Each structure stands twice: as structure tokens, then as C-alpha cells.
Image (tube, grey):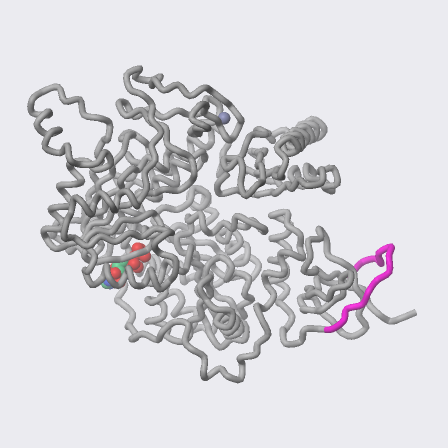
Amino acid sequence: MSSDQLWRVAVDAPLPEALTYSYSGPLERGQLVNVPLGKRKVKGLVLGPADKPPEFEVKSIESLDDEYAALPDAFVKWLEWLSQYYLHPIGQVVQSAFPPLKKTDKQRASKRPPVIPLLESDTFLDLTTEQRTCFESISKHSNFSTHLLFGVTGSGKTEVYLRLLEKVLAEGKRGLVLVPEISLTPQLIQRFARRFGDKIAALHSQLTDRERTNQWWDIVEGRKSILIGARSALFCPIKDLGLIIVDEEHEPSFKQDEKLKYNGRDAAVVMGKLMNCPVVLGSATPSLETWKNAVEGKYHLHTLKKRVANRSLPEIEVIDLRKLKADDDEQKKIVQKYSHLPFWLSADLYERMHEVLDQGDQAALFLNRRGVAQMVVCPSCGHTRECPNCDISLTLHAHSHLVCHYCDYHENFKTKCPDCSEGQLEAIGLGTELLETDLTRLFPGKKIARADRDEIQSRADLEELIHQMETGEIDILVGTQMIAKGLDFPKLKLVGLVLADVGFNLPDFRATERSFQLITQMSGRSGRHVKEGENPGRVIIQTFNAEHDSITFARNHDYEGFAKHELEMRAQLHYPPIGRLVSFRIQGPHLGKVEETAGLLARRAYALKAQYPQYNSIEVLGPAEAPLSKLRGQFRYHLLVKSTQANAANPFSRQLLGDQDWIPSGIKILIDIDPMSL
Ligand code: ADP
Ligand code: ZN
């Protein structure tokens, strides 16, 4: 008899469960260890003692990774929650929390290049009355509680975060700040660095391995007190965590869309709960999930209604792109005068651009080219075609038929508009490059810059662009929504949304919410520094759907009205946040096999539903082709599971997948709990 104890270890391998290993010495939950797996040696995390010996021979733990102190119990619980909730193997969850590399640089700490160039320090601003109220009511809490800081663009949310962090640091605790895409928000990081100097560590995708390793250890070993990073920063175990802030909490990029498909915002709230610290979610356009929780009193709601220093919100004008019928002479003249303009540029936007540029200010044109769906629109009446079952836009395939990507509804694509029976439906393709070319011709002598994924590939590119905007070298900025986030340019007085409709027609039940958020965020870039009594910034929204809900509410700066209306729509069709949604993607290299497996999965789902009364509330949609029906040689189908009962979706999905040995070889089924897009 050996005195070895048995331990459950989550190993870095695609196994559904933790494995059992033996060890003779002292060991505790949360310890990082090296274990044999087949012929390999892998890292693992000790979850706790094993209840009973397995039926096969047990190998022993080779060594402890003693560079690394055992993870706190609350942190291990958080990792276990991720695995349970998102139905992802525990071993593949825990590996995200392993240290990036050995801490080889520790001795050379003094010679490290700074990751955040040290900037002139800033003093704290005097808070406005609204900011003070929010700060005081949030900072009353030191235990777990979730707070929504709902403040219009430019209302000074960041200033509230800074004060909250200052207080947490004064109490000897640490803070975690999550931002959507850190490489796109250099201005925000600089503001933090100016206030907190070298107490800040940052983790983002643009760091070298060595920089990442240094930042990671600086936080873990307590040399730095504030970690600012993208969602993955959650996996860095922070001692004495006193506050978690999630800025722009509505941003879809908080959701990881591969491997462990977690939502960083939701995971942050769970972390706050397990670590018993307050969580602050900030946004001008909160996600409906968060808003619902705030309205129902699960989250504390704190509101900033005004921009700071009585700066006014921009004036929003909506331009209908549906073709003007030139039936009188007056209109004919107008049409003639502007006949040199491309189809995407209205006379109003064109004239406003001239006005702003003549005053030496800047204009920015945004075009959100998200998604792959081509927009089908009637140029006379603005009609777009939606699925009769699902209330989402149909997608054009092969120029011949329209498809619903939720329920697989099909119809032939008729070019004659079924609504006004006058216009011919057109598929519109438009991109930022075309905009730039046209603008160069229309505004000779003006400096035009383009910001999209093709042009801005690194943090340096973006910093250069920001610098040129700040110094006024750029007159007209053309870009996608990637530059709509958090940027603050004093001279930017006009924002044009070239074709707001691009977002409306995504095959996604969140399309309206997305559009409302984008319109509000992009509008929020205009006239941020206009003083009281000066002309406010302007926003021009061009659209074929001037009556679209997202536009009507956004032009009135009415988030609450929008949220109420949209929640009612969601409730009718049991979409989140009223119902829960889970998507199963079936993919493989052979179309026939993918279709067959998708059908098999659907039959399993119906059988489960019929068998268990607790699954009454479950609705099964599809299988249907996924919106990207083929990607990198893989055919893709999906099946959606909707549930009005929050606690039914997860066990149903777990049971539906089962032990997975029914899945034919060559086919993969990927599960997404609370998908952000489909
Ligand atoms: P938000 O994050 O809500 O969009 P910011 O925190 O970026 O708003 O604030 C908008 C602008 O107002 C920034 O230029 C910021 O420096 C300034 N500002 C914020 N709070 C104050 C304050 N209390 N006094 C003066 N200026 C402020
Ligand atoms: Zn449908």
C-alpha cells in the first residue's frame, strides 16, 4: 500500500473531464502541476482530491510548478463555472489561466521597456454633480454588487471609473478594467496611464511574448495594481481584487467566438460574485440583457444624463435615400445641380461637409460593412424582405433565392418590389474604398484618410491616425465602425452615416439593437467639445428606411424608449434576453454528411423534448444553413434552441450532445451558449 493520495487534475488536452493522478507529498487545490499524458508531459491544474480510484492504472504527478502559487479557490471556482456553463472541457478552460511563459525576466526588471510610454501625469478633475452622485452611490459598496453606469456619450463615465479605482487603490486593493478591443482604444489607456502612472499593467494582442509575460507577472505578483485589458485579462489571477469595470459592456467583441465561447461581460459578473467585489458595467447604449437586469432591480442603475460642462448632444438629421420623384421644376433643378454626386452621397450631406470644412473643422463618414449578407433593397420604397416566421432579414443566395438563416425558410428572389410594385429590388454592395475614391474627386485639396481593417492593422497605425486627427492634418475621415469606439476629437463637428441600413439587414435578431448602438456611438463622436451656446455637432444619417425603429429612437437620443420597444419585440418571439438561446453548429468537409448529422441532431432534440416534461418551454429551430454556409472548406449548418425558462437551456443542451459518440467521424458540433451573432 502506498500512501499516495489521488487528485483530480484538469489537463491541457481536449478531454471532457478532469483526470485522476496520484501524489505523495502535500498538494492543494489550485496548484499548477506537470503530469504525464500518454507519451507527453503536459501542464495541469489540481481541482481537488478524487473521490474514488478509476478502473485503470493511475499515473503520478511528476512535479509541482512551484514558481506559481496555487490559484485562489474563488478563481478555480470561476474556471469551473466557465466549463459548466459554456459546456467546454475543463482542461481547455484552465489552460487560459496558465502563466504565458517562465518568468525569466524578473531579474532584469529595471531594464524592461515600458509597455505604456510614461506620459505627463494628469490631476483628477472635479466631478460634476451627476458624476459625484454616481461615484458616491457606487463606492458605498465594497461587496459583490453589479452596477450599470448608463451615461450618454461624453458624459464622463471614464472620469467616474478613474475615481472608483483611486478609492480601491487607497484601500490597498486592485482593479481590473475590461475594454472591448484594447488596441482600438489607445486614448482611453493613455488617460488611465496619466492618472495612475506605473501602477498600470496592460494586456492586449499587440504585445510581444516578453511584454505579455512581464505584464502578467507584474499583476500576479502584485507590483502593479490596475490591469487593463481585453476579455482575456480575466484569466490573469489578481490578488485582492476590489473592483471590476467593464467599459462599453454592450460591445459584441466581449464575446469570444471560438473555442471557449464565453462572454467577457457575463464572466466578469460571475467573477465579481465569486471574489466578492463590485462590478461596474458602463455604456451609453447598454445591452438589452444588462438593461433588463437594471430595470428589474438585479443591477443598480446609475445615470449620467448630460454631457459634461453642458456640452450639447449632436443634432441628428435623417436623410431618406429613396429616390426623389422629380415631378416639379424646382425639384428637377435640384436633381440636376447635384447630378455629379455618387448614389451614396445626398445633397444635404455634401453641403454640410462643405460647411464644416470651410470653417476649418473635420468631418467623418462611417459605413458599417459588417457581415457578409448583401443588402437587398427597393430603391423606390425602401422595402427589404424579412422572414415571415422569424422577423429577421432574408439573405440573397446566388442571385436567385432568399433564405432565412434561422428556420430555413426559402423564397424565390423576385426583382419586382412586392411592396410598391414599382421599383426593382437591387443588391447593393458598397465599401469604404469606393467612398474614399469618390471623395478625393469631390473634395480636391482636402486630406482624406481611411480607417478600416485594411488600412489600420496595428496600434501604431491607429496612433498615427489619432495624432493626425488631433492636429487637424486630416480633413475627412472615412471608416468602418472600428473607429467609432471611444475616440474623442475636438475638431470633429460632422459625422455622416453613409448607409445606416447595412446593419438592419444582417440575418440576426440583434440587428436592430446593433444598429441603434452603432448609430448612437458614431453620432457620439460629433461635437464632443462644443461649448454651451456654440453650434452643436451634427450627425447626418442616410438611409432607405427612415422609419426604422433604431433610427427613430437614436435621432431623439431615446435609449430607454428604444429598449422598452425592442424588449417587447424580443418577448413576442422569445428571443434573448427574454428567452435563452443556444446555437449548435454542425460542420464538416462533406455537405451530405453535414446535412445528415444536422437532421440527426434535430431528431434527437425533438425526442428529448417529447421525453421530458421539464423541456416543454424549449423550441427547436432548423436545422438551417449557417449564415456563412461554407468557410475554409467546411460546410456549416446550425440548429437553434430557444427556451423561455432560463434554467432549461443548459441541461437540455448538455443532454442533446450526450457523450458525442453518436456524431459521425469527420463532423464537428460546436456549441455556443448565449450566442452573440449567428
Ligand atoms: P464618456 O466616457 O462618457 O464618453 P469621457 O469620460 O470620455 O466620457 O468624458 C468626455 C470628455 O469630458 C473628456 O474630454 C473628459 O476629459 C471630459 N470630462 C469628463 N469629466 C469631466 C469633468 N468632471 N470636468 C471637466 N471635464 C470632464
Ligand atoms: Zn425564419
Q: Is residue 299 above or below residue 597?
A: below
Q: Residue furthest top?
A: 421
Q: Residue at x 29, y 30 (%)?
A: 545
Q: Quadrant of residue 54?
A: bottom right
Q: Is residue 352 left or right of residue 251?
A: left
Q: Is residue 390 visible?
A: yes
Majority secondary structure of magenta residues: loop
- In front: 205, or 545? 205
Q: Residue at x 22, y 43 (%)?
A: 438
Residue 191 on image: x %, y %: 33, 66
Farthest right residue in view = 1
State the image coordinates of residue 412 (x, y, percent, origin top left): 45, 19
Does 517 appear in magenta?
no
Answer with the quarter of the image where residue 182 lies.
Answer: bottom left
Residue 30 point in image, percent of width and height: 66, 66
Q: Does residue 420 sit above or below 629 in this rendering?
A: above
Q: Quadrant of the N terminus?
A: bottom right
Q: Residue at x 56, y 33 (%)?
A: 642
Q: Position of residue 78 (x, y in %)?
A: 60, 57
Say whether residue 525 is left or right of residue 225: left
Looking at the image, can residue 128 be seen? Answer: no
The stretch in magenta equals 50-63
Q: How many marks?
A: 0
Residue name at image x 36 percent, y 46 percent: 285
Q: Is residue 58 magenta?
A: yes
Q: Nearer the viewer, residue 244 or 253?
A: 253
**Relative depth, front residue between 253 and 178:** 253
